[in-house]
Image (cartoon, rainbow, N blue to C red):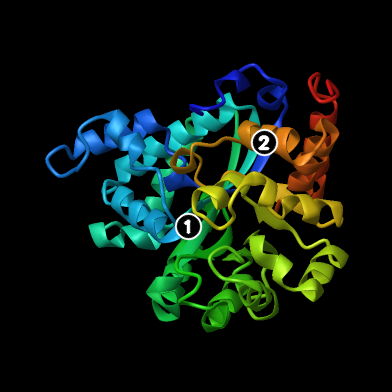
Amino acid sequence: MISDSSDLYGSWYQKIPKVELHIHLEGAIPIDALWEIVRKYKNEHSVSSIEELGQKFVFRDFSQFIETWTWKNKFLREYDDFAYISEYVARDLLSQNIKYVEMFYSPSEFTVHGLEIQKLTESIRLGLSRVPEIEIALIADLVRDFGPEREMITLERIYEVKDSGVIGIGIGGSEREFPPQVFEQVFKRAREFGFKTNAHAGEAAGRESIWGAIDTLKVDRIGHGTRAFEDNRLLEYLAVHSFPLEMCPVSNIRTGVVHSIIDHPITDYYKRGMKVTVNTDDPTMFNTSLAYEFQRLVEKCGFSKADICRLILNGIEASWLAEDQKQNYIDDFVNNKFWNEL
């Protein structure tokens, strides 16, 4: 999977149990499974080999990433496509010793193909149910670009299938162009429906986006939060309140949000005692894995393996599991035979 870190297979980073709180279904499709989907619509795709498909996932900046994301999604057209990719994403995560996942999916992006949000959600759960060895909860990611009126309708349709394991509502899309404040009523309604909430913030836009997500949307977690360093008061707030950040270091490098891993603010945030978690965002598109993320933090940023264990426990603590479930995972992890091989 990771072309520049093949030594990770069988490594401590691979063997330890892990959790993931910020991963997009559509960006995590294993490359061979994605190639099969592309081939299914063979008369309409613009790549001729799996190697050429892989080359599509090299980005000069965040805008090109969004363009490629949109290109890729046009091949997901039928309910069976979503059941198929969900199963293969789950199998891939299980092979990495990831035990618990809270996974984004973006249902409103696929209504252009005539897909109903409720049936699409049920198709995803069908695929995930084929891999019962891993627990995967769903977060429906609304799209800023579609506006609050349309996404309020999306929210209502998601609520109808909440029992398909949808535990939260997020919001992504063009962060610079669509500030969080315009979605205040959507997120209020999401809380009334009993959903946990998240917003992508501090990735393509800065500190004002993070404050807006906290103060106006009243989210439970921030996706990324990379640019919180722009405001010392914000850093203090996040630390004092143990406000969870779903950080995605390699993603931020691939999209040009930061220049390199040593420039990534996660090291400073961790030293400040902030509640940071490590995630992959779109692992296939960014050629990464949790094992690779952790390895880079140790080799390039001065993290110890004990720090990596702490980051993993942060993920459990920041999850939307019930408290007794969190404790069960913590007990299982710290008693895992690989946990203390530091």
Residue placed most toward the observer, 172 or 131:
172
- Compared across the picture, whether 108 is left or right of 169 comes to left
Q: Amino acid at mark 2?
A: Arg
Nearest-to-viewer mark from 2 and 1: 2
Q: Which residue is pictured at 58% across the width and 75% down the height?
A: 187
Percent x, y for residue 130? Answer: 47, 31
Q: Which mark is residue 296?
A: 2
Sequence order check, earlier mark of 2 and 1:
1
Percent x, y for residue 255? Answer: 49, 53
- Circle 1 crowding by C-alpha within 10 Å: few under 14, some 14–19, many from 20: some
Task: Find the residue positioned furthest to the left.
Answer: 43
Percent x, y for residue 106? Answer: 43, 57
The residue beneath circle 1 is 161
- The answer, for residue 325, to whether it is visible in the render is no
- Compared across the picture, whether 308 is left or right of 191 comes to right
Q: Quarter holding the C terminus?
A: top right
Q: CA distance from mark 2 to mark 1?
A: 39 Å
Occupied quadrant, residue 180: bottom right
Percent x, y for residue 273? Answer: 86, 55
